[in-house]
Amino acid sequence: MLEEIRKAGVVVEEIVLAPFSMDDIHQLVVDSLHCELHRAEPLAQLIYAKTGGNPFFAIQFLTELAEEGLLAFDSVAAAWTWDLPRITCQGIY
């Protein structure tokens, strides 16, 4: 499809993303869920293992967790919560 677009005379600029490191995924979780480093670590490790550090898949994985109700905001605690054993058992990725 990209080749067809190029043949039509459209300038296509490609951006190649390297995989996130474990530290990058850890920071993504901390920043996205506004939680402390130590709390984010188990979830970050799981996301890294499931996505191989692929930036697109890591973000999609977090989004799917929220859509599936496996990642939710607890308004009473004013914090994001997740059930790591349930997430681990899910067939996502």
Image: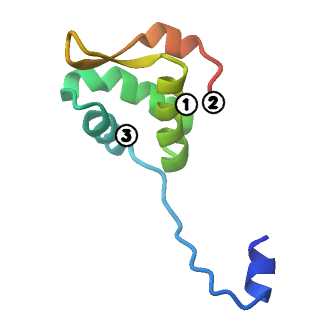
Q: Earlier in the sequence, mark 2 or mark 3?
A: 3
* Disc 3: which residue: 25
The foreground one among 50 and 11 is 11
Query: Could you tell me which residue is drawn at 40 percent across and 28 percent down?
Result: 45
Tell me residue 53's x, y (percent). Answer: 48, 43
Numbered circle sitting on residue 4: none
Query: Could you tell me which residue is drawn at 48 percent across and 49 percent down?
Result: 55
Please tell me how crowded label 1 is: few (under 14), some (14-19), or many (20+) other residues with Cα within 10 Å.
Answer: some
* Disc 1: which residue: 50
Tell me residue 14's x, y (percent). Answer: 57, 74
Three-letter code for the amino acid on which mark 2 is drawn = Tyr
Helix, strand or loop for disc 3: helix
Alpha carbons under labels 1 and 3: distance apart: 11 Å
Badge 2 vs badge 1, beta-carbon distance below 8 Å: yes
Badge 2 vs badge 3, beta-carbon distance below 8 Å: no
Alpha carbons under labels 2 and 1: distance apart: 6 Å
Three-letter code for the amino acid on which mark 1 is drawn = Lys
Vertical position of residue 66 compared to residue 75: above or below: below
Q: Where is the N terminus found, in terms of image quarters?
A: bottom right
Three-letter code for the amino acid on which mark 3 is drawn = Ile
How many numbered discs? 3
* Disc 2: which residue: 93
Relative placement, left or right, of 86 versus 90 is left
Query: Could you tell me which residue is drawn at 63 percent across and 30 percent down?
Result: 93
